[in-house]
Image (tube, grey):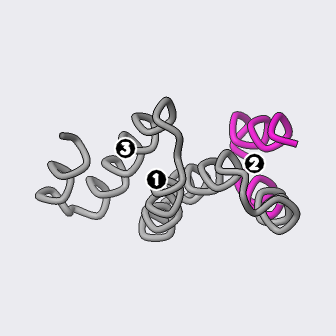
Amino acid sequence: MIKKSVHFLHTLKLQNARAFLKTAIKKTPDDPAFHFNLGLTYYLNKEFIEGFKTLTEVLSKAQDDHVNPILINLSLCLLEMKEYEKVLFYSD
């Protein structure tokens, strides 16, 4: 399932990716990879607030080796939202 969502993201078929990921999350709500990729989908679709919310939720459930990519993408969302001071919190 995760390969299909990554394929949609790489080909920038964002509507397909979002629909697929939401379905996958309903089936396996505890899989952080689906939530992370949904956050990326929101970001790529310039839905920065939704991307930030989704990635923040993933951060609380992430394993140590997945924290850095989440923090980077949270920072990117904040930059796009012009929340410059908050970027410092996530980039520490």
Q: Nearer the viewer, residue 34 or 79?
A: 34
Give the magenta part as a residue range: 1-19
Say which mark, if any, is on residue 71.
3
> Residue beneath label 1, please?
59
Task: Specify the quadrant of the image occupied by residue 15.
Answer: bottom right
Q: Position of residue 59 (x, y in %)?
A: 46, 53
Image marks 1 and 3: residues in contact by CB distance under 8 Å:
yes
Q: Residues within 10 Å of mark 2 (few under 14, many from 20)?
A: some
Between the C-alphas of marks 1 and 3, the distance is 8 Å
**Element under disc 3:** helix
Q: Nearer the viewer, residue 45 or 4?
A: 4
Query: What residue is shown at x 29% (from left), y 57% (from top)?
Result: 78
Give the number of the mark in front: 1 or 3: 1
Give the overall secondary structure of the magenta segment.
helix
**Element under disc 2:** loop
Amino acid type of disc 3? Answer: Leu
Q: Position of residue 67 (x, y in %)?
A: 43, 39
> Residue beneath label 2, please?
13
In the image, residue 82 above or below residue 72: below
Q: Position of residue 23 (x, y in %)?
A: 85, 65
Between the C-alphas of marks 3 and 2, the distance is 24 Å
- The quadrant the C terminus occupies is top left
- The quadrant the N terminus occupies is top right
Q: Nearer the viewer, residue 37 or 15?
A: 37
Q: Is residue 36 magenta?
A: no
Query: What residue is shown at x 48% (from left), y 60% (from top)?
Result: 46
Task: Specify the quadrant of the image occupied by residue 16.
Answer: bottom right
Task: Specify the quadrant of the image occupied by residue 7.
Answer: top right
